[in-house]
Amino acid sequence: MIRMFRAVPILAATVVLLLSSSLVAAQTEITYKAMVKETFGRSSAPSGVGVVQGYGLVTEVFEFLGETPTGDPQCPVTTTGLTTLTFADGSTLTTLDTQTRCTPGASRGAPGSSVSFGNPAKWSGSWVVDSGTGIFEGATGSGTLTVSEGGDTLMIQYQGTLTLP
């Protein structure tokens, strides 16, 4: 009888260990890579289409939150915004993006650059998961982003890691 009582705590500890390890195993960490082509025109909100590796085609909408001057004439502003990707199954993934905009060479100071449209620029920064729905509900993650701008088009590349519940 005493041996049975000794076995109960060991059995209980084993069950707890198995349950907690299965909860940890239930999370999946993936390499996240996405490419989005965004067009914004002179008056429309930024939106685009793209592809997320392993998940297929997406639509994208960017919500501008603000910008902060950097004091650097070649890289004058850092912007923040929310990017929402909508997947074919209706799932969404929203990231908080922070990036600094830099202009190549002397293009920022070229004649007419302050009133022209679509001057070339490169952006670089970071992203962190803000929220998700569907298969991305409860997801966490972060990474880097790079943007090439010309005309009314931005080519945005996201790289990083996502952890899915």
Image (spheres, rainbow, N blue to C red):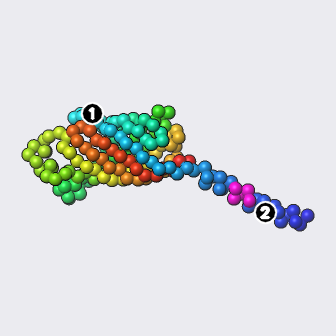
Q: Determine the residue positioned at 65% across, 56% down.
A: 21
Across and down, in percent, residue 123 comes to: 28, 50
SS category of the residue bearing label 1 = loop
Residue lying furthest right? 1
Query: The N terminus appears in which quarter of the rendering?
Result: bottom right
Task: Report the magenta stretch's main SS.
Answer: helix
Q: Determine the residue positioned at 87% across, 62% down.
A: 4
- The region drawn magenta spans 14-18
Residue 32 painted magenta:
no
Q: Place residue 50 in its image quadrant.
A: top left
Quick check: can you spot residue 54?
yes
Q: Place residue 150 in its image quadrant.
A: top left
Residue holding disc 1: 44
* Above or below for 109 versus 60: below
* Amino acid marked by disc 1: Ser
Using the image, tell me which numbered label, if any, was put on residue 9. Answer: 2
Q: Place residue 62 in its image quadrant.
A: top left
Q: Earlier in the sequence, mark 1 or mark 2?
A: 2
- 114 to the left or right of 95: left
Across and down, in percent, residue 36 comes to: 35, 40
Quick check: can you spot residue 98?
no
* Amino acid marked by disc 2: Pro
